[in-house]
Image (cartoon, helix red, strand yellow):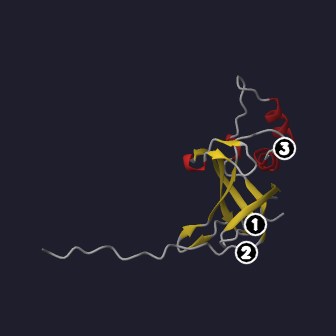
Amino acid sequence: MSPFYLPAKSAGAGAPQVEDGLAILRFDDLTKISHPDWAGTDTFGHADDGERYHFQFTLLDEAHAVQYTDGDPIELEAMTRTSTGEKSNFFAYLSAMLTPAELAQYNEATADNPFDGSMLQGRVLNAKIVHNKKGWPQIDAIIGIAKPKGK
C-alpha cells in the first residue's frame, strides 16, 4: 500500500491589526444571509430565524486609501438582525450612513416604492472600532459620513 499523506494544518490568517477607536470605512455592500444553525430561540426566549443583515466595509486611512494586511484589503463587517424599525441596530447603522434628506426618503419608502440605497456603495464613513473577546475587530457604531479628504 502506498503512503497516504494528509495536508499540513494551516495556521489561519488571524485577526487583522486594527486599533480600537475611530476609523474611516468605505461601505461596500449589504447582504442578507441565512444562518440556519443560529435559528431557534434566543437568550431572551424569542424566536430567531437565523437571518442576518451583513453590512460590509473596507478600512481606509486618513487619506481615504484602502488599508491592507498581507496584501489583502482589511474588510470589516457589522451584523444585525432583520428588524428594520427605528429601535433596531439596522436602523441605527443605516441612519448614520444617510444624509438627512436620504433618511427622510428612506422613512417614506414602502414595499411598493422601495428606497434605492445604491448611492451608499462607496460612501466613506466614520466609525468606532472595538475588539471582541476573541481579539477580532468589529464595528461598534457608525458615527456618520466622513468629510472629504483634505477638509
Cα–Cα gap, marks 1 and 2: 7 Å
Going by the numbered disc 3, the residue's amino acid type is: Lys
Q: Mark 1 points at which residue?
A: 129
The count of marks equals: 3
Q: Name the residue under label 3.
A: 87
Q: Farthest top residue?
A: 112
x and y, in percent, of residue 33 in the image: 58, 45
Question: Is disc 1 in contact with disc 2, using a CB cutoff of under 8 Å?
Answer: yes
The first of marks 3 and 1 along the sequence is: 3
Q: Which residue is drawn at 82% across and 50% down?
A: 96
Label 3 to label 2: alpha-carbon separation: 29 Å
In the picture, the quarter occupied by the C terminus is: bottom right
Instruction: List x then y, in percent, for residue 143.
Output: 83, 57
- Name the residue carrying label 2: 19
Q: Quadrant of residue 118?
A: top right
Q: What separation in Å lies between label 3 and label 1 (alpha carbons)?
A: 21 Å
Q: Please, is residue 18 above or below residue 59 in the view? A: below
Task: Tell me, yes or no, whether the two marked residues, 3 and 2, touch with CB atoms within 8 Å.
Answer: no
Q: Quick one: 124 or 39, which is closer to the camera?
A: 39
